[in-house]
Amino acid sequence: MAIKQKLVFRFPPSVVEQPLIYHLVKDFDLMVNILRADINPDKEGRLMLEMSGSESNYRRAVEWLKQQGVGILNLKQQITWNEERCTHCGACSVICPTGALGLNRPAMTVSFDESKCIVCELCLKACPARAMETLLEQAS
Amino acid sequence: MGKIERTYEEINEKIRRGEVVVLTAEEVLDLVAAEGVAGAAKKVDVVTTGTFGAMCSSGVFLNFGHSQPRIKMEEVYLNGVPAYSGLAAVDAYLGATALPPGDPRNRNHPGEFRYGGGHVIEELVAGKEIRLEARAYGTDCYPLKKIETAFRLSEINEAILYNPRNAYQNYNVAVNLGSKTLYTYMGILKPNLGNANYSSAGQLSPLLNDPLLKTIGLGTRIFLGGGVGYVTWHGTQHNPSVERGENGVPKVPAGTLAVAGDLKQMHSRWLRGLSMLGYGVTLQVGLGVPIPILNEEIMSYCAVRDEDIYAPIVDYSRAYPNREAGNLGFVSYAELKSGTITVKGRKVPTASLSSYAGAREIALTLKEWIREGKFTLTRPAAPLPSVESGIKMQPLLQRDPDEGGF
């Protein structure tokens, strides 16, 4: 059975130098599509990606990544829309690069489709009401 | 004009009897399309409007009550945000754009401006505890020199929202012709015409439904911040003598309102602290004005559609900051709300900084208040200056202050 997931890898500085993606492709026969990477020498790294392949390979890969000290999170839950704080102005709609945040017309209300979100985090500061929130610490 | 004539008294009598007919400035459009202006004027007594946008010229007058011993506050901080206290001993004015002294501002551009006056006002209205710190030089009658305490809105004598400029009648459409991203009070403007940001509710906006200020005047009772407020004066930068369309609607920013109301009966849903990246903090204010349909002429103004309201496209990379005259043309609110406009032959995505959904909800809320008999209309004590006043907004004269005038 095939599986496809959008994930966030968080890895400590010691793992940053390892060719993780190479191993995922070569050793586990997975397809990897990198959405965003935030990797600096001697700092905790973050990698947002879509990973797909057979379920057994996928599970073995996840197990292997955990052994390497990589934290794995579901990308969908990384950016959340605090609907109560949202004033539905729509300022975010021209900043979001993937259309995850958009305006429903003619209702003129904002909606957030998290399946389109690539966790670029541009919305976090573009939203005047600060209605977009993240579980990840801000990259310094 | 026309045969329909209504007085404020007749409308209020219908409100009391529960017979008043109220529609929002959006709802009335279908009726006018079906039955014409005269037909709609015959049926409708009141049209409600609304707007929910960032309004920097907003703030709150506060009276904290007297401490024991007494203090004549010279420096006041609310949750670390400075309030103006060049007033009587325990009076202060907290402005929406005030920042804590320690905020890094734009030192690391664009600054985040996470917390300021607008946020304090939102928390105050929400009933949260506010930290009050004040310093003074001490006098015989006011000996205390320092105080640190906390209070909630319900515990202080007065909190009066007093906004010197709200509800702008039309506004610029901001674009960026330059090659660098701009961080403005009109939001983030991406380079090379990356986006166009506007900020008016258009056909729902209060002053666009009464373009010549025939009904809105001094003392007009309004929806303000989720409660009841009043128009107290024309707003600062009030500029009625500008270019207008045949429908009387100004094509550039024009009239403004000064408004006030008791903060204690307002709601934090409609007074929201905002952080404008690279610009500062401000307050998003919910404001709605009822327009009495006194005659067909007034109805004809309320029948204005987004298609018939035009706004100027202004470059914020050069023209706006340097106060250069001119614009890049005009665009209707119908085009703006479609999501794309054409500027210099290029398709540019649009976004609003004013919530149209919020404006609609305010107009609907005001409509309900009137229908339930909770809100009656007031005849203005005096009109606001309109076209005939000749009032024009003036720029600041810059001259050598040591030269001396004559």
Image: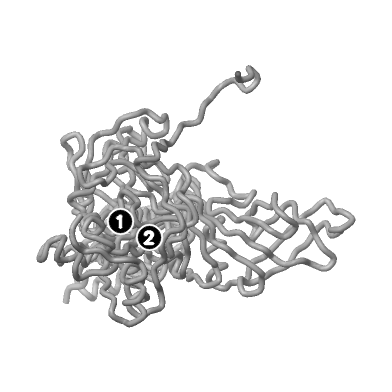
Where residue B280 appears, as percent x and y from the top left, is: 50, 48
Q: Is residue B377 left or right of residue A110?
A: right
The answer for which chain carries disc 2 is: B
How crowded is the residue under tag 2: few (<14 C-alpha within 10 Å), some, or many (20+)?
Answer: many
In what element is the residue under mark 2?
strand
> How many numbered discs?
2
Mark with earlier residue (1, 2):
2
Report which quarter residue A83 is drawn in.
bottom left
Quadrant occupied by the C terminus of chain B: top right
Where residue B42 appears, as percent x and y from the top left, is: 19, 68
Report which quarter residue B241 is drawn in.
top left
Q: Nearer the viewer, residue B247 or A115?
A: B247
Does residue A52 lie above or below B331 as drawn? below
| Residue B187 visible to an observer of this rendering | yes
What amino acid is labelled 2 in the image? Phe
**Residue on which disc 1 sits:** B201
Report which quarter residue B244 is drawn in.
top left
